[in-house]
Amino acid sequence: MKDALRLKLPSWPPRVHFGRQTVANDDNDKESGTSSSTDTSVDSIDDAKANKSSAMFGSEPAYQRLQSPQAPVSRWKQRKVRWLLSGVLVFGIITIILLSTLLTRHSMGGFNTIFMKTCNISLAQGTYVGQVIGPSSSSPRAIEAYLGVPYAQTTAGNNRFRPPQPLDSQAQSNVVYNALKYSAICPPGKTGAGGHGEDCLSANIYRPHFGDDAASIEAEEKRLGVDSKKLPVVAYVHGGGFNMGSGKERNMASFAAFADSPIIALSFNYRVGPLGFLPSAVTAKAGLLNLGLKDQQFFFEWMRTNLPAMGGDPDNVTIMGLSAGSHSIGHHLISYSPANKLSSGPPPFQKAIIESGGATARATFVPNHHLHEQQMKEFLSQCGLTGVPDDELFDKLRALPYSTIVSASQKIWGTWSKTLRWPFQPVIDGPGGIIPDLPINSWNKGNVLRIPILTGFNTNEGAVFVPVNQNDGNATRQLMSSILPSLNKTDLDTLDELYPAVTTTTGKQLYANSKESNKFGTQFWRLDDAYAHYAYICPVLQTATLASSASGAAPVYAYHYAARSPAYGGADHADESPIVTHDLNVIGKYPGLVEIAEAMTGAWTRFIATGDPNKSHSGAKAKFTWPRYTSPFGSDSKNAGRLALFGNGNDEQLKSAGTKSRGTPAKTIALTAREKTECEYWWPRVVYSEGWGNGTTTFTAEKVTIKAKL
């Protein structure tokens, strides 16, 4: 728990403030050479440049010798004046040093705190001091930001390799804490602002700032037609392949600032890598599988408890994820279904936004799958724990230095990531667990929540993952057979037909390198096409199809994001993220992307508020009509297989001559015949990525003994 600041808070933030109202992200300022005074991003103020504090004092005139025009001043009087001035100066310097030390000791970021507009929020565990961002050109709505608010105890020491623990008695409701900087990110993620560490289970809260007093708040509520005590809520589940990432990866402050109507937005950290996901038979026996997913569910419950204090509506909550965050949400849809009996109460969310992922995406094996056992063996070897008895293993792991765990996990990730058979992943943990069965079994049995879903994919989901320099015509066959060893010769021959050689007429049309990608191998786009549909696109469409076809189905909305980016020349995995959040720090100089952002941010936040991307609480008219998705297989509906298409033809970010088209911000299209054919190939083969990975759909708890950890 952070050091407490025993301050008496004002009933509302003061009306008069000096200096800028946002906190500098010094790393970004150094790189770009631009001011961040209108930046909606929030970062630690501890590293702000010390010389900025001089602004509070102004420019001091030089001291001058006092003189009398009437008569000369005695030397004794001159000395007294000099001593007096020296004393005042010394006293002032001492006061400044003491004040600076006091503020720094309490993590208030030094004198720069004086320049920001502060705010506070009172939760059950204490009161937190945050900052107000905007209003400005990049934050049209004033937003209160509270960063690094803990939702569970540290995961270090005896809490390592244990389920998340509730905050202890140190969390007192009458104590004030600093919430002006992000917490550490969970290891072994890449070092970012604040670094990484095991005291990482924290949330970031962004809510509208309606005013500085009761009268102004009431007037703003009336103008907007909202109740500031019961706003729609969205919680972002970050991506990172379950091996890295953090809640701050998505600019949720900007998302809240540009929302169609006021919302409360949260993001949070959860454990990744082996500390969050260490699948093996011994882990299953200890009851310690899927700790990262347990962190997520612990956060959901903490959020539900505290939403009334935040001004949020516990009955209008959307969970939103990208990539691994979306895979997680897919598992939560199953976990919280009545059939799983995880909880006797209602689920802590009512809607889901699933970007580039789902429960059937990538791989979800049993914990003692041979791949996980091999990766576990290598991890323990790196930790120096080879041969340790099962009943001693986790005590030994808890006693290891933090640096040993991080080093070992990063070495294993480095070895396996290039194979696309990633280590440290969620696994099936049996009935009553978070993933009770093969995900496809749960979907086919209808053991999934029926809630409104918004889901979609990007054109080139595979580009960031597949090898870029391959010229071997067998590369696609070899890659997919290494990922899915159960594919037989017939499967692979069909794969070659579906993703034809680049020397064929169809292959040339599909996979010709563009000006932006002519530095890549001839097989790059073919590899991208196959892997994208296996790992992301077809799982997304499988979720949309199964959810919309289920009995008692809730509305489903599907999208395709197509704006091209410079890294590979396509619409890559996660490219939509700054567009969705209307992050002008990323897209501000591209007018076409801003237009796309207006459409996507509006649709996403309308869905969050109402469950319908077309229905605006504020009364604003959507730029296009987004039809509900229905299955294109065996359906006569005129909207069967229809998607929203965002950014088609936009290539503003590309550097080639003549590539500055804004394209079409938003329109609706139907799935193509080729897309349907690709998914018809991949859907029956999902079983090769689940359970035992051999096509068997049977999973019984007897195969993996799981006992509760006391």
Image (cartoon, rainbow, N blue to C red):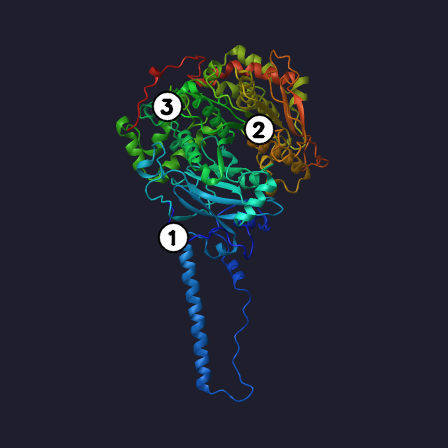
User: In this rendering, does residue 485 appear at all?
Assistant: no
Placement of the C terminus among the 4 image quadrants: top left
User: In percent of the image, x 43 and y 24: which residue is there?
Assistant: 336
Say which label, 1 or 2, has the lower sequence index. Answer: 1
Q: What secondary structure is found at the residue carrying circle 1? A: loop
Alpha-carbon neighbours of circle 2 within 10 Å: few (<14), some, or many (≥20)?
many
Q: What secondary structure is found at the residue carrying circle 3? A: helix
Residue type at mark 2 is Ala
Q: Which mark is residue 463?
A: 2
Q: CA distance from mark 2 to mark 3?
A: 29 Å
The residue at which mark 1 appears reads as: 6
> Which of the two discs, 1 and 2, sits closer to the camera?
1
Q: Which mark is residue 373?
A: 3
Q: Which mark is residue 602?
A: none
Looking at the picture, how far across and down is residue 369, in whole percent?
Answer: 39, 20
Looking at the picture, how far across and down is residue 546, in whole percent?
Answer: 53, 17
Alpha-carbon neighbours of circle 3 within 10 Å: few (<14), some, or many (≥20)?
some
User: In this rendering, does residue 400 appear at all?
Assistant: yes
> Which of the two discs, 3 and 1, sits closer to the camera?
1
Between residue 387 and residue 175, name the one nearer to us.
175
User: In percent of the image, x 45 and y 40: which residue is there?
Assistant: 309
Q: CA distance from mark 1 to mark 2?
A: 51 Å
Placement of the N terminus among the 4 image quadrants: top left
Residue type at mark 1 is Arg
In this rendering, the answer to whether 443 lies above or below 66 is: above
Alpha-carbon neighbours of circle 1 within 10 Å: few (<14), some, or many (≥20)?
few
Q: CA distance from mark 3 to mark 1?
A: 50 Å
Say which label, 3 or 1, has the lower sequence index. Answer: 1
Q: What secondary structure is found at the residue carrying circle 2? A: loop
Say which label, 2 or 3, has the lower sequence index. Answer: 3
